Amino acid sequence: MSNDLTIQRTPSAVEPPLVIHRILEAGIRKSPEQEIVYADKFSMTYRQFGERVQRLAAALAAQGVKPGDTVAVMDWDTHRYLEAFFAIPMMGAVLHTVNVRLSPEQILYTINHARDDVILVNSEFLPVLEGMQDRIETVKSYILLDDDGVTGSDSLPLAGEYEDLLAKAPASFEFPELDENTRATTFYTTGTTGLPKGVYFSHRQLVLHTFAGRNTMAGQGQGRFNEDDVYMPITPMFHVHAWGIPYMATMLGVKQVYPGRYEPATLLKLLVSHQVTFSHCVPTIIQMLLQAEAAKSVDLSRWKVIIGGSALPQALARGALERGIDIYTGYGMSETCPLLTLAQLTPELEKADLDTQVDYRTRTGRPVVMAQLRIVDGEMNDVPHDGKSQGEIVVRAPWLTQGYLHDKEKSEELWHGGWLHTGDVAVMSEDGWLKIVDRIKDVIKTGGEWVSSIDLEGLILQHPGVGECAVVGVPDDKWGERPVALVVKSGDADEEAIKALVSDFADKGIISRYGIPDRVIFVDALPRTSVGKLDKKKMRAEMV
Amino acid sequence: MSNDLTIQRTPSAVEPPLVIHRILEAGIRKSPEQEIVYADKFSMTYRQFGERVQRLAAALAAQGVKPGDTVAVMDWDTHRYLEAFFAIPMMGAVLHTVNVRLSPEQILYTINHARDDVILVNSEFLPVLEGMQDRIETVKSYILLDDDGVTGSDSLPLAGEYEDLLAKAPASFEFPELDENTRATTFYTTGTTGLPKGVYFSHRQLVLHTFAGRNTMAGQGQGRFNEDDVYMPITPMFHVHAWGIPYMATMLGVKQVYPGRYEPATLLKLLVSHQVTFSHCVPTIIQMLLQAEAAKSVDLSRWKVIIGGSALPQALARGALERGIDIYTGYGMSETCPLLTLAQLTPELEKADLDTQVDYRTRTGRPVVMAQLRIVDGEMNDVPHDGKSQGEIVVRAPWLTQGYLHDKEKSEELWHGGWLHTGDVAVMSEDGWLKIVDRIKDVIKTGGEWVSSIDLEGLILQHPGVGECAVVGVPDDKWGERPVALVVKSGDADEEAIKALVSDFADKGIISRYGIPDRVIFVDALPRTSVGKLDKKKMRAEMV
């Protein structure tokens, strides 16, 4: 646009940038005496939190940290991590949240790739760093985080212990004025193959993600997050800033409970003793909690939980709802900061029966404000919103990573056509609810249609003789791809019967006729990756 | 800041601008079948609203409107105005909301000063424009808005009637991609003297104001604005976009009720028939409504009302609370878009007794998120937050006018020192609640202290012989200024008794000893402006 359409600015006028300093300020202003706790180990008020953020910045500055530097954290979910969420970006430095669950080699790769200058490291992870010390390239200083009485390292030169350094640092720090596009955070995402890829977010992006999330989560309906809630994250702070919800919680000024490492007994104890009302986690965690012996006597009926990371199985949702838990799905990914959609019920759906609620709560949800989602075919044409037509989800929003760190090629792939490609295949219903049906690399593109491998597997598994099943697409000159099913028998089953079963489903309109497999191959076990996921890449390779 | 601290952008990556198109999109996506009504005259769903916004844009484009043009509206609060709130800025044009309560000469001044290209005019205001037709400089086209069967003008060349033009226009319009700093709206503010001054706001500013307002107003506490509310504005849409709340209401997807002209009987009827739960108005309107005969039989106990524009008298707040109305104060001004503070109660204060609630609900409130407020003395030093020290409120926020249109000198004055000067004098309590005590031009600066003329008047009025009172500061070589009181007697009163009364209050610490007036002058009537406000400028001039 030509410049003369934009507003005129008086030379002395200030239009303040969107920086996370304002989020912290809002929380302290609203709830100076509200509590933030780390398990049974530490407690502070928001007022003290504000002072400690300044002390941390002063302590880091004393270690030579300056705007543009990168400061890494290796810790479980603690008040220290929350302090780092603010102090490091507020200094103009970049917070690198290290995924401590990666292999040592991958951790080393991310530390070197992000060019970390300082690492704040929990004593539990000292051995990891000690083992790779001579291969760490850019780190000048290590700060010890400790809950267990560890005071030093045999080989790693430690600048000091966190609480000691904070106690010695001045209680006030002059934070610089920042451009809102200043880099604030970075972290790494890992696929099934290849090296970890770095994503990164600016102050502006974090502020707008906070605003949009708060806007969608606030209110009086189902699953809402408000001032009177007590918040405890159960997705790690090193993973997409715990979905960015600590920033929303701080802006709101609610009580926050950080649980450290996720152990069912600890989590349940904290849930009860602090009367936690709002959390988020992956399906396996909630399953683990519900199955824990200690959970049986606990009242969970005031607990709201957003589920993400992978699909929420209907049976699990039903089980949680029967325990009184207000459970529902959120969707996003590391590249998207992460929030894109939430499966919050409309007022009408809140009155619906359990089956209907389970159906909606386990869908991918509806887009949050400012997020633009499209479902497109291979040529970036929108597919109809009819609840059936499949396409890839591509998105725009003011908080998406603008690429992968130091990787132009993968960045261009991610953003080709000016939309961020999620790699997820979904259908959109007429009433605007999104439902993911597959990953795009697993979907079978045949006869001009997209057939979900996951849908097809679900249907084949209904045959009483099928124990396990995986479907992949194999190249076909005429049809592009054709589905081939790998089956582990649990009883009597043969190729013709399985094809006939799928054909019956096709007659009923449940799946496309193109979905009837060309071949059914019986195997003793399905190929899996080292973490136990189906290895469809290997299956496809073996079948060509 | 140097550029290398900002995030890297992949060439194909898009970071979408903050434009009001996204607000409209969010509302339609959320509540396509929700209603928006104009009194008993018109009703549409959000889906239809979205289509009509496109038709309006197409109709305006057919009149030659292009990005950068200015389109004025002269109307009461209607669905048409809401359509203009979106369609005109979304085209890249500027919406000029004409204050139809100004004198014809002032209206003419604003039309020419804003360089309006097109005017949408309610038939009721045709005579105003007809009477000044040959002095209107830039308008090329007039569009008629009508509810009363008026079809034309004797002299004004009308391009057509609004509904006709929309019906003929295509149902879809390709809105341009806009820079977020594109000018979106402009309107004029009038002081007691001088010409109207134009303020202006960008897309970014309106979006951030909407986000911040929604963030502060949402939730489960007192006075909150949520999806299940029914919204009706009772501050005009030509005045600071009805405080920007129509944008919040649209983003939320709530039912909206536009009342047209403000007549007590109509407002009460709409309140009841649409079960309105959320409004905002000036004190005189709520007073008028409460006193209306028809109001006596109406249940107002589900109605939340934000009061702004002038101070909310405690007696009025008490009366409203006794009727069950959830009444509280908001603070802002034309220059600030307007929202700066809200007097929403904390959970503790919600449990407080009526007197305490009245006290807090009638204060100026606490800052909304992202707004930075300071209370400063004449040298821009912060005064203590002790509930007593007075200073001028200066502000920064991402949604303040960046100056006055075509007026460099007044713009620099507004923004001197890099903070927007509100001209309001306030005290801030330790718990962060703001209370306005005076206008800076009326405060008496004496002996290094600021004494509120309004406080002083309130104390003098407690003398049984004083009927009316005004206090002004007159120049004094030694003290800077000294207070002089003008008094209209209602009984027995003399100068010494009044000075002694103020001296007693000073002994009790209620007012500074510098507040004891130098002189008390008895008059038959206080000088007032044409609109009935105390004319302190005239008083000061006569006293020098």
Image (cartoon, coloured by chain):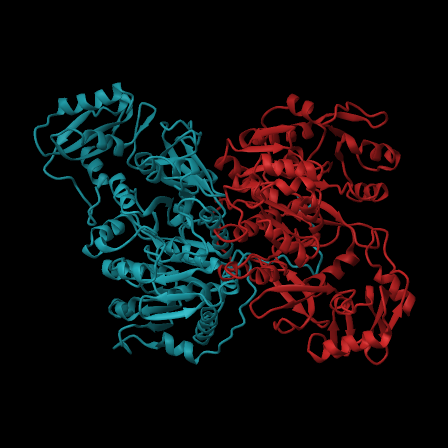
Chain colours: A red, B cyan
| Side (left or right) of A420 relative to B75 | right
The mark total stands at 0
Foreground residue, A220 or B128? A220
Residue B245, percent across and down?
Answer: 41, 54
Above or below for A213 versus A75: below
Q: Is residue B368 left or right of residue B500?
A: right
Q: Position of residue A356 (x, y in %)?
A: 58, 63
Report if residue A40 is visible in the image. Answer: yes
- Residue B349: quadrant of the picture: top left
Q: Determine which quarter of the picture holds residue A3.
A: bottom right
Q: Residue at x 43, y 51 (%)?
A: B225
- In the image, residue A99 sits, relative to residue A431, either above or below, namely above
- Classify residue A65 as left or right of residue B31: right
Q: Quadrant of the N terminus of chain B?
A: top right
**Quarter of image, res A175:** top right
In this view, B342 is above or below B521? below
Q: Nearer the viewer, residue A177 or B312?
A: B312
Please state if B257 lies on the left or on the right of A178 as rendered.
left
**Camera sees residue B308:** no
Furthest residue toward top: B507
- Could you say which is closer to the camera, residue B169 or residue B366? B366
Residue beneath the point at 55% across and 56% down:
B18
**Quadrant including the C terminus of chain B:** top left
Q: Position of residue B518 (x, y in %)?
A: 20, 24
The x and y percentages for residue B494 are 11, 25
A238 versus B39 height, above or below: above
